[in-house]
Image: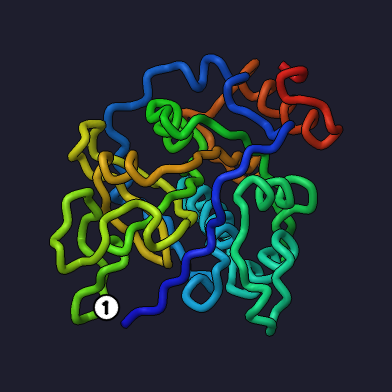
Amino acid sequence: MTLRKLGCLPARVQARQPLLSGMRNFMARKAPPRLGRERIDPAPRTLGNDVLGDCTAAGIGNHIRATAALAGYQVAVDTGDAVRFYARSTGYVPGNPQTDQGGVEVDVLATALRAGYVLADQTLFPLWGSVDAGDLNGIRNITAGLSAAYLGVRLAQADMWEDAAGSLAPVWDTVTPASHGDPTPGSAGGHCLLLWDYDGTADTDPVTLLTWGALQKATWRWLRSRLMEAHGLAWRQLLPNGMLAPTGQDWDALVASNEAYLAGVSSTTAR
């Protein structure tokens, strides 16, 4: 049995959280019908999510690594970095398992915006914003333009099924054998993971997710059935040139919505 923890608490909406709707051109454009990154290794790490419910912190660490990989280099993010951020963003006290209660994604992202994600040799500050979980075109634009989409999903017991070698099903889908357990979304709990690429946009086309230090395949219909929240992160220090990243007024809108959030002003006012 391979150890895998969850840790994403139910989605919450903050009164002034940044929204990506202000990036009108970036979010409204038709996303690429296919996003193939087979030759790029995002090098995800478990970052403590095998023993702690720190998936929200691990997800940000792996987003940093995925963004750097697209630029042809890598950033060192280790388990200690993720655990320290988990403690800072959720109230977890290292060594006290009773405080290992997981995290709310928007609270975790707000901590990253305010305090940064502290690594051994640098502190990285993301811009971020949320999109409706039903906006698959927007989520694909986030994935194509901001390196990966930061998602909150409700996993089913069937998704946690392992074979004799401790491996998950090769492709997560909504149709599972009865022997794999309860297929009801949320029956296992909430989890934070990243959307990295996709082979197409049809219901049965596969996507690649980054979770538990590995690349996990799933179908779009699986992802749509599990999604409870979706966010985009932008690392100004890391984003490579040549991506489908936001520019001009779209980038300014993202900056303004984050500045407004820090100042305590509604993101609607910022637009």
Q: Nearer the viewer, residue 49 or 186?
A: 186
Q: Nearer the viewer, residue 134 or 167?
A: 134
The C terminus is located in which quarter? Answer: top right
- Counting the numbered discs, the total is 1
User: Which quadrant would residue 15 be assigned to in this image?
Assistant: top right
Image point (20%, 61%), residue name: 170
- Where is 91 relative to 266, above or below? below
Q: Position of residue 64 (x, y in %)?
A: 57, 53
Q: Position of residue 229 (x, y in %)?
A: 50, 41
Image point (22%, 50%), residue name: 173
Tell me the amino acid under the disc marked 1. Gly
| Applied colour scheme | rainbow
Bin the neighbour count of mark 1 within 10 Å (Cα to Cα): few under 14, some 14-19, many 20 and up: few
Q: Is residue 44 left or right of residue 207?
A: right
Question: Which residue was labeled with disc 1?
Answer: 166
Q: Position of residue 248 (x, y in %)?
A: 63, 18
Query: In the structure shown, which secondary structural element does the residue marked by tag 1 occupy?
Result: loop
Q: Is residue 212 left or right of residue 126?
A: left
Image point (67%, 44%), residue name: 126
User: Which quadrant would residue 89 be assigned to in this image?
Assistant: bottom right
Q: Position of residue 247 (x, y in %)?
A: 59, 22
Q: Is residue 219 left or right of residue 148?
A: left
Q: Nearer the viewer, residue 69 or 194?
A: 194
Image point (63%, 72%), residue name: 100
The N terminus is located in which quarter? Answer: bottom left
Q: Is residue 252 left or right of residue 26?
A: right
- Where is 1 relative to 188, above or below? below
The single residue placed furthest to the right in the displayed view is 263
